[in-house]
Image (cartoon, rainbow, N blue to C red):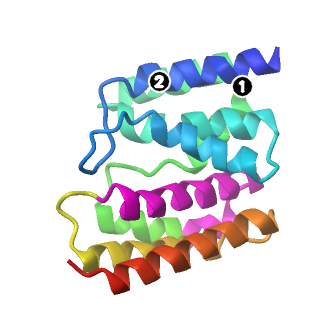
Amino acid sequence: MTEQLLLKALVFAAERHKDQTRKGKSNIPYINHPIEVAHVLSSFGETEYDLLIAAFLHDVIEDTVKNDIEKENLKNDIRKQFGSNVLEIVLEVSDNKSLSYKERKKLQVINTPNLSDSAKKIKIADKICNILDIKNRPPEKWSNQRKLEYLKWAKSVVNGAVGLNKKLDQYFFDTYNKVHTYLKNNKP
């Protein structure tokens, strides 16, 4: 049953993100990102189903709704299909898109230390995947300076989430250091 629910979450996320692509030169389907986040978590021993389901769904509220009615309907769908715990984790990691970009980023740094353990783990895995994308599939219009600023900000967010899975934490910092060095040495 639980494996079926995990696959159901993957299908649910794929349907929600079906018309989206990741920022970057390769037009990679957006669904690859939540799959990568869940994969990073499972690669470092995270096997709790609600966590992995929430990893698949972590961007659906933030990135696939156009208005408050649609958002409420989506929240109800997630609650009915995957449970209140999964919904709460997804809500914890979702930015409020009615706020400015700068305010959303500031709030992530402030709020991350107060998140649930599951939400903190998703934050770390999400930032790992985003940092790897900055190196391997960079957003087309981002300057090297903006990429470095993103890394610095991501590290600030993750600093409020560490301490739950030492190997996941170490992988974040190793990834950060490798990409930071790469960007410093490969200026366009």
Whether the magenta-drawn stretch holds residue 130 is answered as yes
Please tell me in which quadrant of the rendered image residue 50 appears. Answer: top right
Q: Magenta region's main secondary structure?
A: helix
Task: Determine which of the numbered discs, if any, sits on residue 126 in the image.
Answer: none
Return the x and y of residue 184 as percentages of the image width and height.
Answer: 36, 86
**Residue that appears at 67% across and 67% down:** 171
User: Dot 1 corresponds to which residue?
Assistant: 83
Return the x and y of residue 84 as percentages of the image width and height.
Answer: 71, 30
Observer-side mark, 1 or 2, equals 2
Question: Left or right: where does residue 75 sit relative to residue 67?
Answer: right
How far apart are labels 1 and 2 at the CA level?
A: 19 Å
Q: Secondary structure at mark 2?
A: helix
- What residue range appears in magenta? 110-138
Question: Left or right: where does residue 5 sit relative to residue 30?
Answer: right
Question: How many numbered tags mark residues here?
Answer: 2
For residue 174, say whether it is visible: yes
Say above or below: 175 vs 123.
below
Please tell me in which quadrant of the rendered image residue 144 appears. Answer: bottom left
Q: Nearer the viewer, residue 65 or 135?
A: 135
Return the x and y of residue 137 as percentages of the image width and height.
Answer: 34, 55
